Image: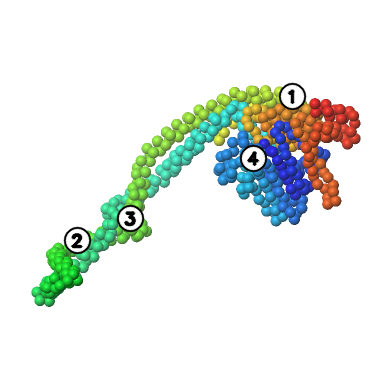
């Protein structure tokens, strides 16, 4: 509920700071005193767009703050989703700067105007002639029926099933579209796949073939250098091994003359062993290397195939070709198995359709079950609001498509006069009739679901005293389950409030300002008397005012 409202530098308001309580609060004041300004300020902090004309002093910023007790609103998921700290006492703040820029905050965290507006809509429902048009929308009408039908959980389960159904249906359409295009590509993809499979791709194959090609293509030079190396090592007189043998013998004679000579001798021994091993390996390699023109041609051909395929597929490695091969294989397999996949997906969609039909039917049955009660309650309440012949025709009929709120087309027709034909609310109901219907609907809804703070803006305009008295009683009854405000010109409605505030203008040297104050019991009597009989207070007006308050 709204616990505090502070408005600074807005329109005719210098600085207003008021605390509110739960229950039913009425707000009164003369025409032009600024009740609409007060509501405008509240609308800004609830997310309405603003401009520089909002500023009373265009050199100073406008600040509007509204504090709410949201401990019972279950809004934790919304705060978490928008990365805002959730607090039982939540503060909404709106600032309009002289530059024209606007800033919004929730619990001192900067937020976008959309976030502020979404949150504000869950905290306060401002009802005016404009908002009454909502009553003519089919979605709102269904929401009313569903509240009475206690369809919240059914609709939640239905929407989850619908989301899954739409997902699987999209997958099915994707398979069908794929099939229609796949036949054209299947032959070409199969050809490309066979071409890649023919070269027996594996990681590292190109490097292996390139190394083998270099050996086969340079076999004469390899043999020549191997032979030369072996000869340099094994020559009887000047070969490296013969010279090392002389060195070995010389160092052996020094080995016993100290640790340094001993270590040097061991190193030379190691070199001799290593060089002898190299000589043997050179000899073995010389025996294994031979010219193989046929193999050279084969390797060259395989390499050329790899190079051509890389160029064809515009890649630079065998690994990339392997990936392309796997993708092509998957495409070919997909096309080969597409019929069975489509059949399987169709069966899944059909199964989901049956489930959705069952859930939609359950929702429809619950709706039609409570519709007679809704019609009866609307018509009975409207009799007390001066509409004795008001009548409704309401029916939930099966639709051809699944919607987010079921599979129904709701027929919601109205007749204000006996013998008149039924018609759509927006075509046959006047503004005053819509206001009274909406008030009745809101009062019914208040018994079934937790509504936010309700702000009625002159909903009683143009009605008689007795009817306004009943309207006040309805709002009073609603306030047992929620916080209700009513901006009113009628004393019958104003007297029903547990609390009453007066909005008034005050002139001073620098201009005119709108003020607001909570009225005491004595002040309420005087205010109601003025509303009944004007500024000149008569004894009868005062007596009537006291009677209204009692």
Residue designated by label 3? 319
Residue designated by label 2? 295
Whole-percent x, y for residue 278 in the image:
16, 66
Q: Nearer the viewer, residue 93 or 437?
A: 93
Q: Is residue 74 left or right of residue 346?
A: right
Q: Secondary structure at mark 1?
A: helix
Q: Is residue 158 left or right of residue 487?
A: left
> Spatial distance from mark 3 to mark 1, Cα to Cα?
82 Å
| 220 relative to 448, above or below | below
Q: Quadrant of the C terminus?
A: top right
Chosen colour scheme: rainbow
Whole-percent x, y for residue 503 in the image:
79, 40
Q: Nearer the viewer, residue 176 or 147?
A: 147
> Spatial distance from mark 4 to mark 2, Cα to Cα?
86 Å
Residue designated by label 1? 383
Dots 4, 3 in contact, CB < 8 A: no
Q: Quadrant of the N terminus?
A: top right
Residue designated by label 4? 89
């Amino acid at each position: 509920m709204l616990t505090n409202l502070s408005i600074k530098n807005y329109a005719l308001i210098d600085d207003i700071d008021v605390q509110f309580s739960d229950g039913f609060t009425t707000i009164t004041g003369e025409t032009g005193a600024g009740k609409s300004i007060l509501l405008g300020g509240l609308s800004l902090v609830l997310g309405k767009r603003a401009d520089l004309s909002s500023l009373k002093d265009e050199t100073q910023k406008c600040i509007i703050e509204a504090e709410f007790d949201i401990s019972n609103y279950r809004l934790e998921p919304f705060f978490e989703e928008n990365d805002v700290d959730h607090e039982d006492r939540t503060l909404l703040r709106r600032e309009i700067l002289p530059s024209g820029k606007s800033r919004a905050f929730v619990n001192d965290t900067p937020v976008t105007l959309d976030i502020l507006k979404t949150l504000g809509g869950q905290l306060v429902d401002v009802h005016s002639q404009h908002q009454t048009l909502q009553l003519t929308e089919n979605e709102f009408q269904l929401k009313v029926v569903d509240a009475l039908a206690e369809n919240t959980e059914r609709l939640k389960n239905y929407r989850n099933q619908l989301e899954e159904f739409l997902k699987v249906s999209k997958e099915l359409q994707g398979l069908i579209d794929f099939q229609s295009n796949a036949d054209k590509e299947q032959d070409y993809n199969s050809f490309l796949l066979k071409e890649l499979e023919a070269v027996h791709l594996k990681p590292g194959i190109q490097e292996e073939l390139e190394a083998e090609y270099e050996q086969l293509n340079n076999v004469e030079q390899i043999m020549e250098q191997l032979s030369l190396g072996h000869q340099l090592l094994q020559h009887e007189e000047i070969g490296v091994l013969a010279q090392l043998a002389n060195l070995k013998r010389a160092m052996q004679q020094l080995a016993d003359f100290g640790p340094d000579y001993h270590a040097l001798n061991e190193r030379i021994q190691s070199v001799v062993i290593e060089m002898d091993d190299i000589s043997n390996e050179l000899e073995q390699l010389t025996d294994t290397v031979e010219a193989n023109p046929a193999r050279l041609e084969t390797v060259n051909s395989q390499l050329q195939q790899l190079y051509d395929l890389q160029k064809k597929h515009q890649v630079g490695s065998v690994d990339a070709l392997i990936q392309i091969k796997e993708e092509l294989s998957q495409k070919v397999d997909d096309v080969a198995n597409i019929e069975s996949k489509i059949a399987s997906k169709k069966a899944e969609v059909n199964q989901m359709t049956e489930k959705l039909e069952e859930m939609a039917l359950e929702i429809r049955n619950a709706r039609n079950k409570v519709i007679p009660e809704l019609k009866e309650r609307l018509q009975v309440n409207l009799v007390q609001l001066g509409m004795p012949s008001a009548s409704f025709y309401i029916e939930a009929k099966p639709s051809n498509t699944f919607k987010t709120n079921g599979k129904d087309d709701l027929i919601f027709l109205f007749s204000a006069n006996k013998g008149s034909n039924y018609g759509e609310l927006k075509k046959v109901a006047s503004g005053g009739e819509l206001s009274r219907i909406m008030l009745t609907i809101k009062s019914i809804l208040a018994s079934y679901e937790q509504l936010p703070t309700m702000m009625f803006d002159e909903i009683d305009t143009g009605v008689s005293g007795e009817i306004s008295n009943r309207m006040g009683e309805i709002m009073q009854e609603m306030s047992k389950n929620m916080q209700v405000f009513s901006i009113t010109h009628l004393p019958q409605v104003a007297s029903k409030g547990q609390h009453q505030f007066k909005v008034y203008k005050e002139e001073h040297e620098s201009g005119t300002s709108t003020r607001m104050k909570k009225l005491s019991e004595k002040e309420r009597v005087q205010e109601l008397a003025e509303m009944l009989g004007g500024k000149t207070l008569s004894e009868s007006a005062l007596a009537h005012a006291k009677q209204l308050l009692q």
